[in-house]
Amino acid sequence: MPGAEKLQNPEEYQKIFHWAETQKDGSVPSFAVRKNDPYEYQAGFNNHFESEAVPGTIPRGQNSPRNVRFGLYAEQMTASAFVAPRHLNKKAWLYRSRPAVAHQGFTDLPDNKDTECNFLPLNPRVHVSPTQLAWLPFDIREEEHDFVDGLATIAGSGDPTLREGLATHLYTANKSMTKTAFVNSDGDFLIVPQQGALDIQTEFGMMYVQPGEIAVIQRGQRFKVAVEGPTRGYILEIWGANFELPELGPLGANGLANPRDFLSPVAHYEVTKDDPWQIKYKLGGKFFVSKQNHCPFDVVAWHGNYVPYKYDLTKFVNVGSISVDHIDPSIFCVLTARSRDPAAPLADFLIFSPRWDVASHTYRPPYYHRNVASELMGLIYGEYGGRSDEFQPGGVSFECGMVPHGVAYEEFKAASAQPPPEMRISEGAIAFMMESSRPFTITDFAWNSDKKHEHEPSMWDSLVDNFSNHKDEVDEILRKAGKLAIGTNLQKANGVANGH
């Protein structure tokens, strides 16, 4: 790849504590992308960008002139209601060799039995369960398959035709898409590579996304994925919303995922004639195909704020407690998406990456807790200490809302016995959580998989009752306070007091 340098150590970026290490304390020029990334990008989140592969192409002062330079066609992609408030209005103008409307109609494709879009409990293909479930890494099957062929759904909520909900998927691939583009007409894809890089061609330009980075391809945007070998990763799909940066509140202006670290492509066109292509569409969870005799990536210039983007997770700025106790996991939120409930998000994407832990007089592991969120976790690389049993890169862990979770007694005892050191945690690892205020149901694909296993409930059997060992001490305190001794039966005590 021109302009890219092959990594001598494929794990080079997995070993760093934070992206800041690549700058070598200012002794080298700063750079925005990994040295094996061959492409140029524009920086910023939700910006109004413009990009020209041929300078002087974009018309000034208007969007759709009577004649666009070079005989190009102007095509607008509108992703919000026309009357949406200005700060929520999403659109892009594309100037291309031939418009997307030049196609030969649509044909149904066979259903992908491993994907699902309707997560209502009335659907017999989904399952409701309070059990804490997990899956070992899913195999990358040997027969040739590309990114679209390798989609499989784990869990989700709602239905895309209702314009609110989400789905969590896995993808695998061992060959590149050729003469084929894909369009998700249902919602936005947040793509999380776990094994193997993705070389993504979009209508807006090129993106190279590798493990430790994420990409967002928004609803209706055409793209093609090339791979370099056996490839696997995760997808969070949302319906009826777009991803946003979470509010920072008292953190102020900086921290978490900073807007300038998000990168969008620059215009890159491919113009061909009499060149058969097929465009695969996902709509209502079903798949369709449309054929055309020209390349769909023929955009010479574009401008707007509805564009694909990527983000390097090693640039995330962790924050946390520097005195006592753990802060809620919302401090690990990279991207969020709104629901119709202003107090509860449709989806959050959180990461648990290398960071310092310095809180004193504080129980170090995740505390025992229950919360309203559905939590689906994955591991990109390394080891994650917050799970209670086997958790491997490429695996999945799931807990539904209000189901209690926490570590086994051995970890509790060790963490309670001595003060935690000032330490760096999650070194060489990135785990993530796809979280929602909505309850998840689980697909047939995941439910019937031989990779599924339960978080072993017996691991908590050894959580001993330490309180009862202090019975005499507690009884004496209660006696001095004029209260009933521990364990006293109130009905029996009242009977004695009444002379019965």
Image (cartoon, rainbow, N blue to C red):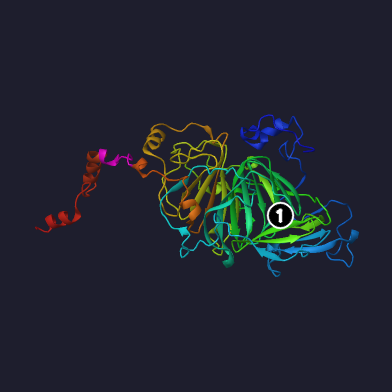
Residue 318 coordinates in the image, percent (x, y): 59, 42
Q: Is residue 243 something one can see in this rendering?
A: yes
Which range of residues does the magenta coloring cover?
Answer: 461-469
Crowd around label 1: few <14 · some 14–19 · many ≥20 (10 Å): many
* Amino acid residing under circle 1: Ala
Q: Spot the residue most to the front.
A: 143
Secondary structure, mark 1, is: strand
Residue 210 coordinates in the image, percent (x, y): 66, 41
Q: Spot the residue most to the left.
A: 499
Residue 126 coordinates in the image, percent (x, y): 47, 59
Which residue occupies 24% across, 41% down? 471
Screen quadrant of the N terminus: top right
Q: Is residue 117 toward the left or the right of residue 47 in the image?
A: left
Residue 51 coordinates in the image, percent (x, y): 81, 53
Q: Spot the residue most to the bottom.
A: 83
The foreground one among 270 and 370 is 270
Is the residue 308 above or below the residue 138 in the image?
A: below
